[in-house]
Amino acid sequence: MTDEDILLGIALTVVLATGSQILANKLRVPALIILLPVGFTAGALTDIIHPGRLIGPDFSALVSLSVAVILYDAGLGLNLRKLTGRTRGTVTRLLVIGILVTFFAVGGIGPALFDIPLRGAAMIGMILVVSGPTVVGPLLEYVRPTDKLRRILIWEGTLTDPIGGILGAVTFHAVATSHRIDIGRGYQIGQFLISMGVGLAGGAVGTAILWLTLHKLRLGETLGTLAQLATVILVSAICDIVRDDTGLIAAIVTGLAIANLPGMDMPARRPFLETLVQMIIGLLFISISSAVTPASVVPVLVPSLILIAVLVLLIRPLIAFAASRGSDLTVGEWGFIGWMAPRGIVAASTASAFSATLVAKGLPGASKILPITFLVIVGTVLLYALTAAPVARKLGVVRPARTRPLLVGGAPWVIGLGKALKAAGLDVLMWAGLDEERERITTAGIALAHGEMLATATNPRARLEGVSAVFLLTDDDDFNALASVVIKDNVQGPVYRVGPPRDSHGVVAPYTGGDILFGRALVRHRLAARYEQGARFHVQPGSRPIPSDYDILFVVRADGRLAPVTGAQTIAPQPGDTAVLMGSV
């Protein structure tokens, strides 16, 4: 290829990857639904984005390092404190049972479906055991299942990727170096354990380096992110040099350790790293799918559809049922787990890396591995994307749209507001620091948040679960301002604070942005003064006119979503809504 072709190919790949993700966001669908057909179509129309021509034989090494960065980022999102008891057992059973059943089932029916030898079917079976957070995560964000289901599926998808990658490498060597799958006498099991050992050792080294650079040297956000990228790439590359695909284990172990080590304080959101991961995912899927030609897809299309049906309708429900035995999962929960097993980037990358080598070694049917994997990825992602939400609603495992607010503060007017919101039909939580305030909250019949909830919300590496809006209403304006900045990225919903007095001399509050509740006319001290003088909060249907001497504070929509009046917007209640007002003195 000429320099002009290379420049055009790189530019086109980046544009297609970015444009596909923007389009998917606007259509509110997982990005893979757009990325895969766009890459496939672009590869059919032009060969300048084909990775074999654009990058050459080194593409598989680049894919391995890119996937390592993706898995490191996924590992940073895993909180070991939430993987306890029966949840941990469920995840473990999903991993073990899922890998074994998928491998043997696909390996068993593969020869008959695709007219390939057992070795080729075994390779496909091991490739398809993986799922992946890059696919499961966006689907769960769209479906919004309960927190327990989300934890189980994210842990399963994140952990199965590196384990599946290692097992894929072991299976690859088993089928590439002999005329049969040699697992007799424990040889391949020993190879797997050696690979795990190398990956764990690499993870320990990566953790030590990042502990030194992030904890001891106290690097800022920019240099700290660069240090993480450099460490993950270095450790993963060295591990892959020692043993194939062990870099994936090293990457996820490093991320998992860094996220859970005391004192590391990794933020729950990492904007630069998240942006980089999104770009890597787009580039990989466009590149890999462009390598699949229409001529290779047509012969395996019908058998692949049969395989997808077996995976979705038989194998995954069986795995979910077996894994749910002895757990506290309801029928609806295990049913949804049985309807969520899309394949993603690790399946695509391992198929791309292994199939080319097996074709070169002359393995019969090796040329079918990549198109089969491509079709399974497209089929499972498309099927689950279109059906997961209605299935979750049917099974009753969707997190309700109704807002669950957390009110922080224990002044009498705050408790009165909490009672009004509860009367409007919301499940209100409150938190206060003083014992007498907490006692007044309990006496008012409002649920009291557990002691560590606010600490969790202010922890930069934690996400506050079970709360969809936070209202900071304490008498300390500086606390409200600082907390609104600290926890805004840790809550799956908006964070608001009550306005400080106009003449406030606080250190932070007068100069901090953010959403101010009720506008400048109803700042904290005026709300407290009006309440002390006899003004009370009232709840009325949205169809009734608002009295002229009442101030509208909130509107609870018909579906339970809470819309507050802020300094930037006013809210008009509609028929079917509920309005929360503050009356006159």
Image (spheres, grey):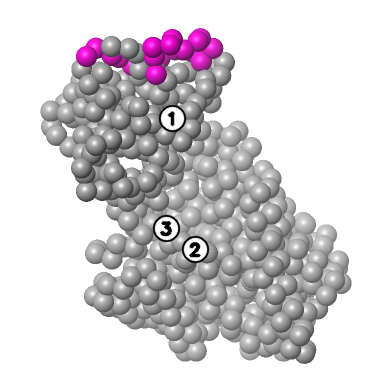
Quadrant including the N terminus:
bottom right
- Residue 440's place in the image compared with 157, above or below, is above
CA gap between label 2 and label 1 equals 30 Å
Task: Give the extent of the magenta segment.
Answer: 533-551
Give the image location of residue 114, x and y in percent.
Answer: 79, 68
Q: Is residue 544 visible?
A: yes
**Which secondary structure lies at badge 2?**
helix
Q: Identify the residue shown where x is 62% and y is 82%.
A: 60
Q: Is residue 547 magenta?
A: yes
Magenta-drawn stretch, dominant element (helix, strand or loop): loop
Disc 1 marks a residue whose amino acid type is Pro
Residue in the foreground of this view, choosing between 307 and 147: 147
Q: Earlier in the sequence, mark 1 or mark 3?
A: 3
Quadrant location of the C terminus?
top left
Question: From the viewer's perspective, is the residue at label 2 or at label 1 nearer?
Answer: 1
Which mark, by number, is residue 274? 2
Q: Nearer the viewer, residue 122 or 532?
A: 532
Which residue is identified by label 3?
A: 269
Look at the picture and state if 147 lies above or below 42.
above
